[in-house]
Image: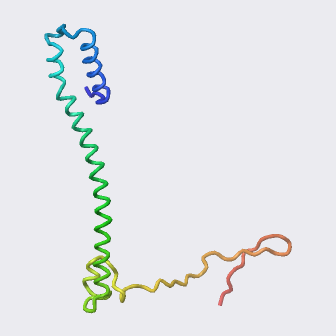
Amino acid sequence: MKHNPKKVAVKLQQVADAWKTLRPTKSFAGMTLEQFQTQIQPSLAARDQLTTLRGQTVDSRMQRQQSDAASLNAAQLVVNAVRGDVAEGENGPLYAAMGYIPKNERRSGLTRKGSTTPPVSTTATGTTAVATPAVK
């Protein structure tokens, strides 16, 4: 049977606190309060460890983000140096191997696409008419 970890922690602490507050010298289920606390200690220790690991995870992610930014800046400096190198340049195989498109393989980017929809014009009577392209 699955148990909700948050509820388990609350329940264990509630039982231990009540026992400690109201009947600290009495034993139940053949255990003293100290024996019970020793028995539940692994469960509480695991929760403490998870809390510590969550904090370390957040810290590690922040460190990774900061070092990634510095690393990307260093990589950009190297790429720029390769582009400016006389022997390598923007058309060299090293530049392409670094994941960039060599200058001589780039497209111009200029496109001349025709109109896909005919223009709509309003007539003098207030109705709209769709102009049809002239056939040559």
Q: Residue at x 24, y 8 (%)?
A: 23
Image vertical order of residue 4 relative to residue 53, above or below = above
Quarter containing the N terminus: top left
Residue extending farthest right: 125
What residue is at 21 percent from the left and 11 percent from the top?
24
Quadrant in the picture for residue 34 = top left
The image quadrant of residue 36 is top left
| Displayed quadrant of residue 49 | top left
At 26% from the left edge and 22% from the top edge, which residue is drawn? 12
Residue 115 horizontal/vertical position (percent)? 61, 79
Name the side, left or right, on which 109 lies relative to 13.
Answer: right
- Between 34 and 90, the one nearer to me in the picture: 34
Q: How is the image coloured?
A: rainbow
As displayed, is residue 34 above or below residue 91?
above
Provide residue 118's location: percent of width, then percent of height: 66, 77
- Residue plotted at (30% across, 88% down): 89
* 33 lies left or right of 114: left
Q: Position of residue 50 (x, y in %)?
A: 24, 38
Numbered-mark total: 0
The quarter of the picture where the C terminus appears is bottom right
